């Protein structure tokens, strides 16, 4: 057990109502002699948060908070990452990564309101979530104590937790374990562990929750139009929606057509590779629609600069540095770049694929009179001769030098 110099009297626990956090709640009381305040965040994961609140009180929490954070999640986390065009290692749209700092933020707020001197979470000592929770908490409350039971206790896994619950009379409904772990929110579902730890093994049949099997998806494609204002999606098929409604609608449309499944081996911040499967139907649709509108509205050099910075931004989010100055500085730049990104994208969804069919914008930099292959009066094609020769100068000199050296 970790020994803290500061005595812990009250702890705010990120509580899901499942086996791990129910055991953790009791373990903290027994080990630290502290009161436990349970906190359950509703970020659209589909869990019964009120049920978890009641269960936390029955398990021994002195108070329990179930908080609806869905709007804040979309407006302050989903949309900023979308505006940045962020994707980690080419595939992952970061749905779990940016959910953790919001949960940590609310934990700190509740700790202040409750007069607690510590927070606790159920993340393991091998994963990224422990880093994301704790970096966020320390950034917001530098002197907060953090309790991470999986790094402290002698329980080794699920069976030990079940035995602990039985020995201490903790009411935990134990069912047959899924052969993988799952974490859901309004933006996506992540799957990892268990049978997925073999990177050669295909995901189990029936694992995916938000998307239809692409092979069983409708045989007729569906067109959808997504509208953006300053980089934020605001409407689908001409209907303006609230941020939460828009993400839900995008999930429903794209999920029906099997869009948004990703299966990758990624590099965790703690240093190991891990296999993760991610299901992000609405996010995938919005990502491609956003890029389509950007292609019309962003200057070439600005777009290239943004794209060069995306890996740095995505790594900051993935690694838990949401509240770090570099992520905040990059966000300001990304948001400034997004000012002209207003317009619509028309896309086709068909059996797991998203295809851009068209895009339009009042801020379009596309000029038909300049790009046309027909006769025009705004571009003198003869100018290209000098342009090409100037760009070829260094290549010609290099070749001439090599030829001269070979002749010696």
Image: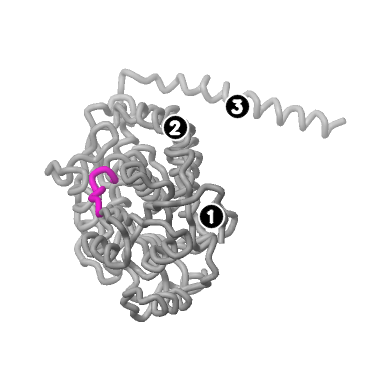
Confirm whether the magenta stretch covers residue 130. Answer: no
Q: CA distance from mark 1 to mark 3?
A: 43 Å
Q: Secondary structure at mark 1?
A: loop
Question: For this rendering, which residue is in front, 256 or 13?
Answer: 13
Q: Earlier in the sequence, mark 2 or mark 3?
A: 2
Q: Looking at the image, which residue sits at the far right? A: 408
Q: Residues within 10 Å of mark 2 (few under 14, many from 20)?
A: some
Please state, as top left, top right, bottom left or bottom right, where the C terminus lies in the image.
top right
On the image, the x and y values in percent for residue 128 come to 49, 54
Q: Is residue 39 left or right of residue 92?
A: left
Residue at image x 40%, y 68%?
A: 23
- Judging by the rendered image, the residue that carries numbered circle 1 is 268
Q: CA distance from mark 1 to mark 2?
A: 22 Å
Confirm whether the magenta stretch covers residue 69. Answer: yes
Q: Which mark is residue 330?
A: 2
* Relative height, residue 28 to residue 313 (above, below): below
Q: Earlier in the sequence, mark 1 or mark 2?
A: 1
Residue at image x 48%, y 44%?
A: 135
Query: Is the Cβ of the residue at disc 1 closer than 8 Å to that at disc 3?
Result: no
Give the image's coloring scheme. one colour
- Judging by the rendered image, the residue that carries numbered circle 3 is 392
Q: Which residues are magenta?
A: 66-73
Q: Secondary structure at mark 3?
A: helix
Q: Residues within 10 Å of mark 3 (few under 14, many from 20)?
A: few
């Amino acid at each position: 057990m970790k020994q803290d110099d500061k005595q812990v009297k009250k702890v705010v626990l990120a509580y899901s109502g499942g086996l791990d956090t129910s055991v953790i709640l009791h373990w903290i009381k027994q080990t630290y002699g502290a009161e436990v305040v349970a906190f359950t965040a509703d970020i659209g994961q589909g869990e019964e948060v009120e049920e978890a609140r009641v269960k936390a009180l029955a398990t021994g929490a002195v108070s329990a908070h179930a908080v609806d954070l869905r709007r804040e999640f979309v407006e302050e986390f989903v949309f900023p990452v979308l505006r940045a065009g962020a994707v980690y290692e080419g595939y992952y749209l970061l749905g779990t990564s940016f959910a953790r700092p919001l949960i940590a933020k609310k934990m700190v707020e509740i700790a202040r309101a409750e007069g607690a001197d510590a927070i606790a979470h159920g993340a393991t000592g091998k994963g990224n979530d422990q880093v994301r929770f704790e970096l966020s908490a320390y950034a917001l409350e530098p002197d907060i104590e953090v309790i991470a039971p999986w790094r402290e206790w002698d329980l080794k896994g699920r069976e030990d937790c079940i035995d602990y619950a039985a020995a201490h009379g903790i009411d935990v409904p134990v069912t047959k374990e899924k052969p993988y772990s799952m974490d859901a929110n309004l933006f996506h579902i992540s799957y990892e562990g268990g049978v997925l730890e073999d990177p050669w093994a295909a995901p189990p049949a029936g694992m995916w929750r938000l998307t239809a099997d692409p092979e069983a998806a409708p045989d007729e494609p569906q067109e959808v139009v997504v509208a953006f204002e300053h980089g934020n999606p605001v409407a689908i098929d001409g209907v303006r929606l609230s941020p939460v409604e828009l993400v839900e609608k995008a999930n429903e449309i794209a999920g029906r057509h099997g869009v948004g499944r990703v299966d990758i081996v990624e590099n965790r911040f703690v240093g190991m590779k891990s296999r993760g499967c991610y299901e992000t139907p609405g996010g995938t649709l919005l990502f491609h629609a956003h890029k389509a509108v950007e292609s019309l509205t962003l200057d070439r050099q600005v777009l290239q600069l943004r794209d060069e910075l995306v890996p740095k931004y995505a790594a900051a989010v993935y690694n838990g540095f949401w509240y770090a100055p570099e992520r905040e500085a990059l966000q300001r730049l990304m948001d400034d770049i997004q000012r002209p990104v207003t317009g619509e994208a028309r896309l086709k969804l068909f059996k797991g694929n998203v295809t851009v069919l068209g895009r339009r914008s009042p801020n379009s930099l596309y000029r038909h009179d300049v790009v046309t292959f027909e006769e025009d009066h705004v571009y003198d094609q003869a100018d290209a001769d000098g342009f090409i020769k100037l760009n070829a100068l260094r290549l010609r000199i290099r070749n001439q030098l090599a030829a001269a050296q070979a002749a010696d």
